């Protein structure tokens, strides 16, 4: 199964999960003027071109149905709580909490049946009432979370080192110019349309956040100032810049059954005004060596794999 076919299959699976969850989604269509300038109908967003095909490895860590949330950011501000209006959703490592450090995560348990103790996290998404302001709104439990590693189309990938940190997007994009902002917003069935605004999806189609992480490692550091220089994005065409090494490219797809016509938004810092441009995500790799070896072997062989562990 190719990368495009896999995306179609994921979209179909998301739709099935939403139906099975019994989520009632209204049939009325809405337009962006009714919701505000931060929203855009997804069909008005130009589609991107799918990148070169490479191997893929997909596994499951749940959808945070257990409610693992807090205001910490173990990569940026370890041991500290964040502001109460900036809450993160977590899957994977269960020890990622206020007061934790990256080094304290090993042995903390995991939501991943295959034993992956990595931590994956992003700001919660809330549905807000008409006219609501401030930081309120009902936190939405994702309808599905899909974790996939992809190979590199230009070279073999090497093992991702334990405790490697990765970041995508920019929590301060409104106030710092947005150079690191990433177009992560999409809809099930339209995954090649990526927006910087909250998408208005066709009725019955899940809202998606697609976090594509950088995958070219400098071969030395597990982190760097600003958390961006040790792990960078490939060049056009997929190759890694000189003096960097291709590691498995992580893609996290988070799906939500947002009622049609509802206003929704992510938790942001005060000055960022709930902007969709500030969406972001982090990971810390703690895959067991044997599992990472399995990932690398699958990707370098160009296969499409689903974890059978657990």
Image: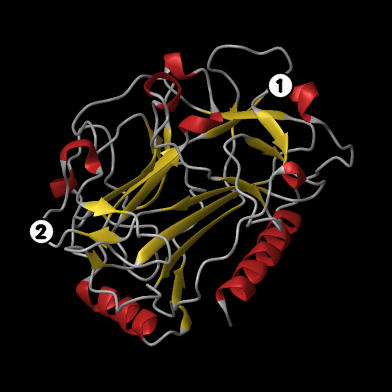
Q: Position of residue 45 (x, y in %)?
A: 69, 44
Q: 197 and 243: which one is in front?
A: 243
Q: Crowding at label 1, few (<14), some or many (≥20) Cα neighbours within 10 Å?
A: few
Q: 134 and 61: which one is in front?
A: 134
Query: How many numbered circles does the render carry?
Result: 2
Q: Secondary structure at mark 1?
A: loop
* Cβ–Cβ under 8 Å for marks 1 and 2: no
Residue 288 vertical position relative to residue 66 in the rendered view, above or below: below
Residue drawn at 51 percent across, 32 percent down = 277
Q: Secondary structure at mark 2?
A: loop
Quarter of the C terminus within the rendering = bottom left
Q: Position of residue 252 (x, y in %)?
A: 47, 55
Corner quadrant of residue 188: bottom right
Q: 8 and 125: which one is in front?
A: 8
Corner quadrant of residue 71: top left
Q: Position of residue 240 (x, y in %)?
A: 29, 64
Quarter of the N terminus within the rendering = bottom right
Residue 54 relative to residue 166: left or right:
right
Q: Which residue is mark 2?
A: 220
Residue drawn at 38 percent across, 87 percent down = 301
Q: Which residue is mark 1?
A: 36
Residue 151 vertical position relative to residue 301 in the rendered view, above or below: above
Q: Crowding at label 2, few (<14), some or many (≥20) Cα neighbours within 10 Å?
A: few
Residue 310 relative to residue 50: left or right:
left
Q: Position of residue 107 (x, y in %)?
A: 20, 57
Upstream in sequence: badge 1 or badge 2? 1
Q: Residue furthest left?
A: 220
Residue drawn at 87 percent across, 37 percent down = 29
Corner quadrant of residue 257: top right
């Amino acid at each position: 199964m190719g990368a495009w076919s896999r995306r179609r299959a994921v979209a179909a699976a998301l739709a099935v999960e939403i139906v099975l969850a019994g989520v009632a989604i209204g049939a009325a269509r809405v337009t962006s003027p009714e919701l505000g300038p931060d929203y855009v109908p997804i069909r008005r967003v130009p589609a991107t071109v799918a990148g070169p095909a490479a191997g893929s490895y997909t596994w499951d860590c749940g959808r945070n149905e257990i409610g693992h949330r807090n205001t910490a950011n173990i990569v940026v501000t370890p041991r500290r709580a964040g502001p109460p209006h900036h809450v993160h959703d977590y899957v994977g490592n269960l020890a990622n909490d206020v007061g934790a450090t990256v080094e304290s995560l090993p042995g903390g348990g995991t939501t991943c049946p295959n034993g992956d103790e990595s931590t994956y996290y992003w700001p919660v998404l809330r549905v807000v009432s008409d006219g609501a302001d401030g930081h309120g709104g009902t936190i939405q439990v994702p309808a599905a979370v899909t974790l996939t590693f992809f190979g590199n189309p230009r070279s073999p990938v090497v093992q991702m080192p334990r405790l490697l940190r990765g970041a995508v997007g920019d929590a301060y994009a409104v106030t710092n110019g947005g150079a690191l902002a990433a177009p992560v917003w999409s809809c099930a069935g339209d995954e090649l349309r990526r927006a910087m605004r909250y998408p208005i999806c066709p009725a019955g189609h899940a809202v998606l956040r697609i976090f594509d992480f950088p995958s070219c490692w400098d071969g030395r550091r597990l982190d760097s100032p600003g958390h961006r220089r040790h792990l960078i994005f490939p060049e056009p065409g997929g190759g890694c810049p000189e003096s960097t090494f291709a590691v498995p490219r992580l893609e996290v797809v988070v799906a939500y059954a947002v009622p049609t016509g509802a206003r929704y938004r992510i938790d942001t810092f005060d000055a960022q005004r709930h902007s969709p441009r500030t969406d972001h995500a982090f990971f810390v790799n703690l895959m067991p060596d044997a599992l990472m070896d399995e990932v690398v072997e699958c990707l370098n062989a160009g296969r499409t794999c689903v974890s059978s562990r657990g």
